[in-house]
Image (tube, rainbow, N blue to C red):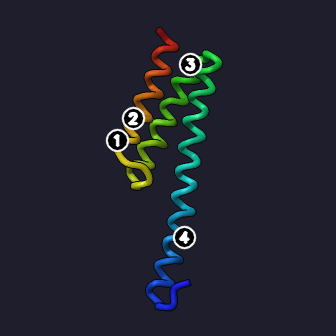
C-alpha cells in the first residue's frame, strides 16, 4: 500500500473511476447481447430498436474513454451487419 498522501489519493480516485467505468462497460455489453439475442430469434423490429440503443451506449463508452474509438466503431459495424443480414 502507498505511504505518500498523493499516492493514497490516486489509489482512491483510480478505484472510484474503475467502478464507474465498469458500470458503463457492463451496460454496453448488456445492450450488445440484447441485440444479438433478437438477431438470434430473428426479431427484426426489436433488433433495430435495440441496435439504436446499443450504438448510443457504445458511443457513450467511447466518449468517456472506456473503449477506443476504433473498437467502438467495429462493435457498431458488426452489430449493424448482423441486423442487416437478418432483414435481407
Dot 1 falls on a residue whose secondary structure is helix
Quarter occupied by the N terminus: bottom right
Mark toward the start of the polypeptide (2 vs 3): 3
Tell us which disc is closer to us: 3 or 1. Answer: 1
Point out residue 80 in the picture as x, y percentages from the top left corner: 44, 25
User: In terms of sequence position, does the residue under pointer 2 or pointer 4 come before the other?
Assistant: 4
Q: Are marks 2 and 4 in contact (CB under 8 Å)?
A: no
The residue at which mark 1 appears reads as: 70
Residue lying furthest top in this view?
88
- Which residue is at 54% across, 70% downward? 15
Q: Is residue 54 left or right of residue 41?
A: left
Sequence-first tag of 3 and 4: 4
- Judge whether 50 appears above or below 39 on screen: below
Residue with the most extreme bottom position: 4
Kindly identify which residue carries mark 3.
Answer: 45
Element class at badge 4: helix
Q: Residue at x 51, y 91 (%)?
A: 3
Give SS at disc 2: helix
Query: From this viewpoint, which residue is outermost toward the right?
Result: 41
Q: Position of residue 2 (x, y in %)?
A: 51, 85
Within-10-Å neighbours for mark 2: few <14, some 14–19, many 20+? few
Instruction: Judge whether 88 appears above or below 67 on screen.
Output: above
Q: Marks 2/3: CA distance?
A: 22 Å
Amino acid at each position: 500500500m502507498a505511504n505518500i498522501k498523493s499516492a493514497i489519493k490516486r489509489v482512491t480516485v483510480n478505484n472510484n473511476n474503475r467502478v464507474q467505468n465498469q458500470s458503463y462497460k457492463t451496460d454496453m455489453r448488456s445492450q450488445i447481447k440484447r441485440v444479438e439475442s433478437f438477431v438470434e430469434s430473428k426479431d427484426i423490429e426489436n433488433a433495430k430498436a435495440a441496435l439504436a440503443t446499443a450504438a448510443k451506449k457504445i458511443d457513450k463508452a467511447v466518449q468517456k474513454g472506456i473503449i477506443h474509438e476504433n473498437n467502438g466503431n467495429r462493435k457498431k459495424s458488426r452489430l449493424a451487419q448482423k441486423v442487416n443480414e437478418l432483414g435481407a
